[in-house]
Every structure is written in structure tokens, then in C-alpha cells.
Amino acid sequence: MGEISLNNIIRVSVQGVQSSIGAKNINEIALFTSEESTSTAPYMIAVEPSAVVEAYGTNSLTAQMVNNIFAQNPNIISGRGYVAVIPLLNSVSAKAASFTTAALTVSAFNAVTNGSLTITVNGTPYSLTGMNFKNVATVADVAQIIQNQISTVIITEDNGKLVFSSKKVGSTSSVVLSSSTTGTDISGADYLNVATGTTAQGANSSGETIEAAIQRIKSKVRFTGVVSTLWQEDSAVQNTSAYINSNDYIYLNVWADTAAIEGVCSDIAAANQNQTRCLVYTNSLDGAKLMLAAYVGRAFSVNFSGSATSQTMMLKTLTNVLPDNGITQNDYTSAKKNGVDLYVSYEGDAGVFSSGGNKYFDVVYENLALKYALQAQMYNALKTTNTKVPQTEAGMAVLRNAMGQVFEQFVRNGVIAAGKWNSAQTFGDPSTFINNIANQGWYVYSTPIAEQLQSEREQRIAPMIQGACKRAGAIHEADIMVLVEE
């Protein structure tokens, strides 16, 4: 007797749901390096430092920067990030100019109690006077006495010689020692013997640029933050900055020369290139790169899936970094105006100074994270529907709800908060707009389907969806007034 299939009566099909995508992780960092590696891979992905240290060597700047990224607490791992170490092709860092004296006779300095010298750094002369060398015992002691008088050069001892190095890199960098007309001139033959010293000219960077390297590698590895071991002259930095601000990246660069605050950093801020973050750290050139790495490790650490995880960089402590001893109040005030972040000592307590002169870092960082989250969520709303999202008001509600879920996520993590809308610009119903911002911190509106252009409808494009939100902000400063009565 034949069997009749149940499919004649009950027809069952089991379908899987469409898979969704995750938002791009803003805490993925690219470290472009001009140093050589034992690895032949086009890049290395690091979630801890050991493989990078092995490939580049313990004493390499690459390894030291990676170590400093992971030394912070929290760091990029807290934000589920990584460091992609990417070799630059035939790249050579820009060089700072320097002047090296002949070997010194320390005892000759002991008779000098009112020493003087003129040092012209990058075209600006500095007159040093009143230097007392009576108690110096080593060439390093001589270096320290002179260093105490000037912050625009780095003075070091090398085999009994003094090396005066500019903090500025590139062909416009220069260091010239000359005589002074007051006190005891220490430029002469008995002391620094400037006439027999040697000058190393500053030089520009060469080889593959950072922006060319990004173009070459971006299809192979994903990243948002961009830093480098490469020192670039200011014009090259500005080229990189212009490229970065046309793409979804955040570029962080550091200078050791405070002149950059009113110079190239001011120009970057004036051009509204807020995806380029300017840092200044004057203690040393290598120290500046390590400060940059520490800053990046701490800054790119937010897990946006969490609750109250949003942060500002203001007053954050950086591990393995000493506060900058070359920053004056004038530098601090100028940095505040020109969008430059610093690492300073506030009466003995080390902390980052975060400037809003080119927007605050957290504003740029969180805006990009919000963009990534919205892109992924709206894509998933379309992708994970097995049938279709209809071109009706019900279909538009699906998209509005998806957008609202992202805003709610950013309320939870502390980026968005309820508040008063102060701008004159609104959309949709103004009263509904203002009430939603006041009560929940965000508002979503879509143009009615009935008002959509037929040409757009035929292309299956949704009507315009608009969102608004109120940033939670952060408190960086406060004024206190106390009334006291006897």
C-alpha cells in the first residue's frame, strides 16, 4: 500500500533569519612605522605588545609606542580595539637641526660666574646671561646650566661634547651658537669653541607618506585612529590633515616645539580640520611620541555598548609619561585657543589638558562612533527582514525605531542626555521636537510617505529621516565664590 506525503496537507519550511553586521569599531588604531621589522607581513594586528616587541625589537620606537598604548588603564582593549602596525614604504623621518661642540674642558668653566651666549633657534635669537658654572664637575653639569636658560633646544652630552638640538623637525629647523656682548662669552675657544663645532642641517621627511599608506592598506585592514613613528615637517602634516578630514579617520600628531601651537596647530584649527588632533610635548622628541601613544591608548578606550562609559580626556593620567616641564602659562593659554592638548603638572598633579579650540577630542570621537552605530543599525533594519520593509508609514516606523535604538544606546553610555534645545533650528513639529529633546535627549522624524517625490519612490529610496540629540557634554572647569562674614 503506498504512503501519501504529509506535504499534501501540511507544508513546512524552516528559514534562518538574515545575519546582521556590527558597527565599525572606532577603537581600532593604525600605527604607521618607518622602522624595520623581522616580519614580512604587510601589517600586524596586536591586542597585546609581545609580538610587536619581538618583530621590531625592544628598543625600537614602534615597540615602545605599542607598549605605551597598552599600558594605559583603561586602554583600547577595554573598547574591544586593536593596534594595526603598518610599515611605511621607504619612509625616512624628518630630522631636527643640531650643533655639536668639540670636546670641552670642564675646569675652564669653573671660573665663569656670569656666562653668556646667544643661541638662534629656527631663526629666533635667544640671549642667555648670568650663567654660573662655578660648581660644575662634568660636561653634563655644563649642559644642565645652559638648559636651565632655554627651552627651545634640547642640550645633551655626548662623549665630552655638547649637542644642541632643535625641537622642530624639517629643513627650516636650525641651531646657531654665537657670541654675546655681556658677561663672559662662553662661545669662545676656551669654552664651547663654537668655531670648531659641527652643524647638522634639518631635513624633510621622504618616502611613502601617511596618506599614501592609508590608500594602499585601507582595503586590507580596518582602523579609525591614525598615528605614526614618522616625524613630518609641518607642510607634510598639513597634507595628511587635509586627507584625513575628507575621510572617516582621526589623525593624532605631536610636536616637541611650542612654536607649533601658534603655527601649524593654529592653521589646522582655522581650517576646521577637527579630525586632526594636535598634541604638544616638549621634554624630548622620543618622549613626545611616547606621550602620543599613551594619549591614544587612553582616548580610544570607550566601550559604547556599556553604561556610563563616555569619557573626556581632561585631567586624565597617562601611564609611563612624565608631565611636560617646558609648558608655560602663555603656552597653556595659547593651546586652549588653538586646539592643542598637553600633558602638564597642575601644582604637582599630572593630567591631560584637553582643549576645545578645535573641538574637544571626545566630541570628534563620539560623533564618529555615533555615525558608525547608525550606519550599522539602519543597514541591519533593511538586511535582517526576510521579506521587505514596505514603502509605507509602517515601514518608515521600522527605520525610525532602529535609529531611536541607537540614540538610546548613546543615552545609556553617557554621550547623549535630556536637556534644553537652544538652537533655533528644528524639524518636524517644533513642539514635539523640543519636548522629546527635553525628556529623552533625542528626536527622530521622517518626511511623510505621501509627500515623497515619485522619482525617489520609484528608486525605492526612503523619505528623509532626520535625527537630533543633545550632547551630555562634560565639566572641565568651575568658578567658586565663597561669602565669609566675621
Image: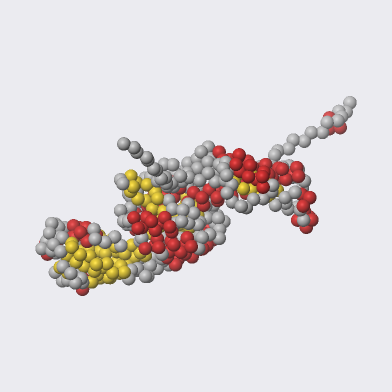
In the depicted structure, whether residue 33 falls above or below residue 378:
below
Image quadrant containing the C terminus: top left
Name the residue nearer the viewer: 165 or 115. Answer: 115
The color scheme shown is secondary structure
In the depicted structure, whether residue 461 falls above or below residue 113:
above
In the depicted structure, whether residue 273 falls above or below residue 119:
above
Q: Is residue 55 left or right of residue 149?
A: right
The extreme right residue here reads 1
Look at the image and tell me whether residue 240 can be seen. Answer: no
Image quadrant containing the N terminus: top right
- The x and y percentages for residue 27 are 50, 47
Name the residue nearer the viewer: 245 or 79. Answer: 245
- The x and y percentages for residue 190 are 14, 69
The extreme top residue here reads 1
Q: Is residue 319 left or right of residue 16?
A: left
* Residue at image coords 47%, 49%: 83
* Residue at image coords 38%, 45%: 317
- The x and y percentages for residue 327 are 33, 55
The extreme bottom residue here reads 195
Name the residue nearer the viewer: 464 or 483. Answer: 483
* Residue at image coords 13%, 62%: 113
* Residue at image coords 47%, 47%: 300
Q: Is residue 97 left or right of residue 468?
A: left
Q: How many marks?
A: 0
- The x and y percentages for residue 286 are 34, 56
Look at the image and tell me whether residue 463 can be seen. Answer: yes
Q: State the image quarter where residue 19 is shown.
A: top right
In the depicted structure, whether residue 122 falls above or below residue 353:
below
